Image (spheres, rainbow, N blue to C red):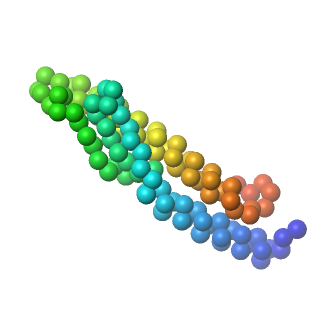
Amino acid sequence: MPSLEEIMQMAQNAQAELQKAQDNLDKIEVEGQAGGGLVKVRCSAKGRIIAVAIDETLLVPAEKTMVEDLVAAAFNDARAKADQAAAAEMQKMSSSLPLPPGFQMPF
């Protein structure tokens, strides 16, 4: 059984790895789409919006409501993909740490 000092060291190492993984999430990019690719949103796995692309065929006043709906849908798609990428990265990070049995990482 590990000593209290060893457990504290494991916790400190886990915290450092968690911070490194969190910082890395801003480097992972995902793309959400809507309208068959007419609207695209690129964001980091941390949720930072990097770019929005709107096909020029949508840039007419009569399409305003549809463009708004497609932009919202593309943001939601990108957010879902960012959450998936973040969860996968956190899982990968936590599986490589030597943690005591039953220890849960605070994601």
Q: In the image as oriented, which residue stretches furthest toward the bottom?
A: 5
**Is 84 positioned to the left or the right of 13 in the image?**
left
Position of residue 67 in the picture relative to residue 98 (left or right)? left
Of 55 and 86, nearer the camera is 55
Quarter of the image for residue 64 reads top left
Q: Is residue 101 left or right of residue 74?
A: right
Query: Residue placed at 71% from the left, 74% from the top?
Result: 9
Left or right: where 31 falls relative to 57: right
**Number of numbered discs visible in the structure rendering:** 0
Instruction: Determine the image quadrant of residue 58.
Output: top left
**Residue 23 percent coordinates (x, y):** 48, 62
Residue at 56 percent of width and 47 percent of height: 87
**Residue closest to the far top:** 62
Residue in the image at 32% along x and 51% along y: 50
Work out which residue is located at the far left of the displayed protein and give it.
Answer: 61
From the top left corner, tell me how far across and down residue 6 is, in percent. 77, 74
Image vertical order of residue 81 relative to residue 68, above or below: below
In the rendered image, residue 48, in percent from the top left (x then y), is placed at 37, 52
Please indicate, yes or no, whether residue 102 appears anywhere in the rendered image: yes
Indicate whether 10 appears above or below 81: below
- The residue positioned 11% from the left and 27% from the top of the image is 61
